[in-house]
């Protein structure tokens, strides 16, 4: 399961800003597009991006936190088989959890978790204007 807003540390957002300013968030070993997607994301930055979405949902009272978690979990469970099949070669046998990011430092897994979260949120933002405003608010939360 992806970390909840309460599970992510309060220091993730400031740490993410420092990480973004000081280094590229994704490391890569070559220039092919597949290799770029296989890198590691700074764990504080990955957690901060997810945390910013959760915080913005709460601030805008888009839906109750429990509803967000239920919808996110349901969609993640439904979509996981497709993610796993498409990314089998990029998935470690055991996730690297030493950085306390819940596996979010793995860019492939981060992309999946982020996709699921944003898809759930988008279902509650019926117009392009509301989606744009929400994205702006998430960006402001990060800054």
Image: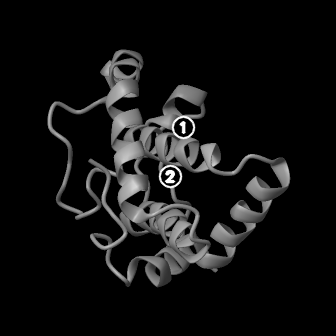
Residue ID at (48%, 40%): 116
Residue ID at (50%, 52%): 26
3 and 101: which is toward the camera = 3
Q: Position of residue 48 (x, y in %)?
A: 46, 69
60 and 23: which is toward the camera = 60
Few, some or many residues within 10 Å of mark 1 (<14, 14–19, 20+): some
Q: Position of residue 69 (x, y in %)?
A: 36, 53
Q: Position of residue 10 (x, y in %)?
A: 37, 83
Q: Which residue is mark 1?
A: 36
Q: CA distance from mark 2 to mark 1?
A: 8 Å
The quarter of the rendered structure image containing the C terminus is bottom right
Position of residue 78 relative to residue 62, above or below, is above
The answer to which image quadrant residue 106 occupies is top left
Q: Position of residue 40 (x, y in %)?
A: 40, 49
Marks 2 and 1 in Cβ contact (< 8 Å) = yes
Decide which of tag 2 and tag 1 comes sooner along the chain. Answer: 2
Q: Secondary structure at mark 2?
A: loop
Position of residue 32 relative to residue 17, above or below, is above
Residue ID at (51%, 36%): 37
């Amino acid at each position: 399961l992806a970390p909840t807003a309460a599970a992510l540390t309060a220091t993730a957002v400031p740490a993410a800003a420092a990480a973004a300013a000081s280094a590229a968030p994704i490391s890569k070993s070559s220039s092919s597009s597949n290799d770029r997607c296989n890198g590691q994301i700074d764990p504080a930055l990955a957690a901060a991006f997810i945390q910013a979405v959760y915080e913005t949902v709460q601030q805008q009272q888009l839906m109750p936190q429990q509803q967000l978690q239920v919808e996110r979990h349901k969609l993640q469970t439904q979509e996981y088989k497709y993610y796993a099949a498409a990314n089998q070669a990029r998935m470690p046998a055991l996730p690297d959890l030493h950085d306390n990011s819940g596996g979010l430092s793995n860019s492939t897994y981060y992309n999946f978790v982020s996709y699921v979260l944003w898809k759930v949120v988008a279902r509650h933002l019926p117009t392009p204007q509301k989606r744009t405003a929400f994205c702006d608010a998430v960006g402001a939360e990060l800054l």
